[in-house]
Amino acid sequence: FFFESSTDMSGTTQKRDPPNWHPFGDFPEAVAPQQRMSALQARFPNVRFMEQTPQLTALMTIIRDQGTGREEFVFYADRIIRLLIEDGLAQLPFEQKQVTTPTGSITNGVGFSHKLCGVSIVRAGESMEAGLRAVCRGIRIGKILIQRDEATALPQLYYDKLPEDIASRKVLLLDPMLATGGSALQVCRLPPHDAVRCSTTLPRL
């Protein structure tokens, strides 16, 4: 699914949630997946799910099969990641543009309304970087390391390296594993010196 945020990543305009509040972690596993998806979307309108096509279901079946070997798992996981990123890119804003074809005629089309970049949450997010580069040639990718503080049990920012002009870009935040959503929320609350006012799309398997 995708979590879209259009708030200021500096955290200055965001509502602070209670320390033990977990936006994605309080839905019992016993609840049917479709019910959990509907409940999440009802509570969080910015959450979007990929269409559960037969192809996607087949790919997920392969990587969940205990008989799938390592090479097969990597191959099909990469296919899913690429589909997920393609779907995430489709959620971003586009603008009208005109181009000249090789025959000299003018044709109308669309293009991304902003420059793009990726930000991977180390280390799991790095597994999605190849898929993003495969569909966005030359895209810049930053990295963020977030770990849980042993004393407070809350996610803390330990390292970040982001594109200098990230404030003017649309950001795809890469994180294939999401339990409570704490790391993703922490990224959206970067300190003022890393402030980013942009739309963030979080592709997650």
Image (cartoon, rainbow, N blue to C red):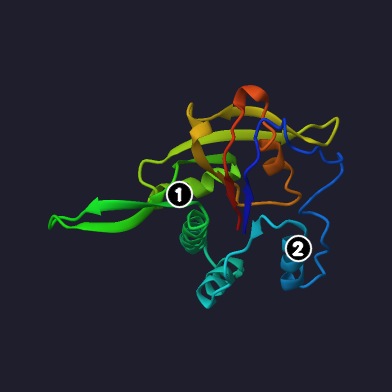
Nearer to us in this view, 67 or 73:
73
Q: Answer left or right for 105 relative to 113.
A: left
Write the residue at 46% across / 61% down.
75
Q: Residue at x 62, y 28 (%)?
A: 195
Residue 120 position, x and y percent, is 56, 41
**Secondary structure found at label 2:** helix
Decide: is 183 above or below 106: above
The span from disc 2 to disc 1 (Cα, nearest Å) is 29 Å
Percent across and percent down for residue 76 are: 49, 63
The residue located at (36%, 41%) in the rendering is 138
Which of the two residues, 6 or 143, is positioned nearer the viewer here? 6
Residue wearing tag 2: 42
State the image quarter where residue 173 is shown.
Answer: top right
Q: Give the residue type at disc 1.
A: Leu
Q: Nearer the viewer, residue 82 or 105?
A: 105
At numbered mark 1, what does the secondary structure look like: helix, strand or loop? helix
Residue 132 is marked as 1
Three-letter residue code for mark 2: Ala
The percent coordinates of residue 161 (x first, y second) are 54, 28
Residue 192 numbered mark, or none: none
Judge left or right: residue 15 versus residue 4.
Answer: right
| Image quarter of the N terminus | bottom right
Question: Percent position (x, y) of residue 25?
Answer: 79, 54
Q: Mark 2 or 1 closer to N-term?
A: 2
Figure quadrant of the C terminus: bottom right
- Number of numbered discs: 2
Q: Which of marks 2 and 1 is in front?
A: 2
The residue sitting at the left extreme is 103
State left or right for residue 14 relative to residue 48: right
Asked where in the image residue 156 lies, by quadrant, the reply is: top right
